[in-house]
Image (cartoon, grey):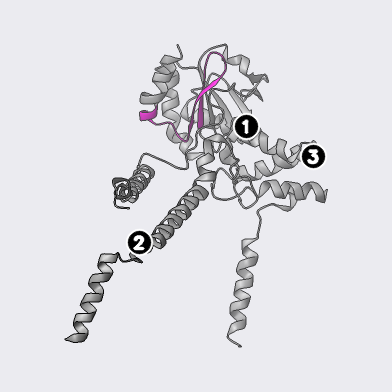
Amino acid sequence: MTGKPARLLFLLPVLALGALVFYLAKALDPDRDPARVASALIDKPAPAIDLPLLETGGGRLTNADFGGEVVLVNFFASWCVPCRIEHPILMELGSKHAVPVFGIAYQDKPEDAMAFLAEFGNPFRRVGQDASGRMAIEFGVYGVPETFVIDKTGRIRMRHAGALDDATVEETLLPLLTELGR
Amino acid sequence: MRGFAPWLFGAALLLAAGSAVAVEPDEVLSDPALEARARAIGREVRCLVCQNQSIDDSAADLARDLRILVRERLVAGDSDDAVRQFLVDRYGDFVLLRPPMRPSNYALWFGPPALLALGGVAVFIYVRRRGRGAVPLAGLSEAERGRLDHIIADEREG
């Protein structure tokens, strides 16, 4: 009973405590947001988009509009406050970085969405209307704004829930776009 | 006894409040069997806006949209599993309040029972060793017995 193995047993609780502390410390990481969940659609083909265009004159927004380019798809709404906060960033992505950005107006009245774009500028190549919010559900959207990166083969490569910020754009989004060969 | 009734009433009210659902009358299907299936699914689907509520409990717009979607798919003839899979394909396993058993979350399912079993084994070994440890104390050797007799005899004389 007094051999070495028995004495090593006393280390067991210490090791268990160590493991516990490790995982609890990980959970306390201020950068970790438990409410933020990875999209189930990462690396999967983007859902088939077929929405009426917001711009007058009819026509529809479909995946064919992406033209085999790396594109951003941004769900927004005129009634959404964080969308106003992120809007300048979308404008900059469209103008300064020449990224093709497509908009989907989520559960918005067409006239409200158009007034929103008239007031703050239109960063989108084309805008589809998702009045029912069904297209958003196809994309697994929790709430606006959400932004998706779709690669040349039409697969979703990144999802950002909530307003885009400069740090995300500089550190994650632009490097990814470069990697995807824009 | 008179002071007890209001408490009982209050408790009954609280219980009733706990079972309230956010399903609105205009969403309810006319077919009670389908509606019952929709409720059973809705109770187990997470509202992604207010993440610790089911879509049946939540008043969020997205929860309402998902409740309507669940009903539409049931009316269209989908099985319960097909409806759940439809949601999982878009929102991931996280959308299910009861996580499915998969290799990636075996630790979640088997961790607690494994720890309990480990504790049980540890207690079993500890108890057995303690019991066995008492045995070697039972006997005295011939020499010890002789010495003991000698000491006792000495004490009797003294």
Which quadrant of the view contains residue A176?
top left
Q: Residue at x 25, y 67 (%)?
A: B144
Q: Badge 2 is on which residue?
A: B136
Q: Earlier in the sequence, mark 1 or mark 3?
A: 3
Q: Secondary structure at mark 1?
A: helix
Disc marking residue B75: 3
Q: CA distance from mark 2 to mark 1?
A: 65 Å
Q: What's the magenta region?
A: A146-168
Describe residue B60's horizontal placement relative to residue B35 as left or right: left
Q: Amino acid at mark 1?
A: Asp
Q: Earlier in the sequence, mark 2 or mark 3?
A: 3
Q: Badge 1 is on which residue?
A: B89
Q: Residues within 10 Å of mark 1 (few under 14, many from 20)?
A: some
Q: Amino acid at mark 3?
A: Val
Q: Residue at x 66, y 25 (%)?
A: A51
Do labels 2 and 1 touch, CB within 8 Å?
Answer: no
Q: Residue at x 57, y 17 (%)?
A: A154
Q: Earlier in the sequence, mark 2 or mark 1?
A: 1
Q: Secondary structure at mark 2?
A: helix
| Of residues A170 and B53, the one drawn nearer to the viewer in this rendering | B53
Which quadrant of the view contains residue B48?
top right
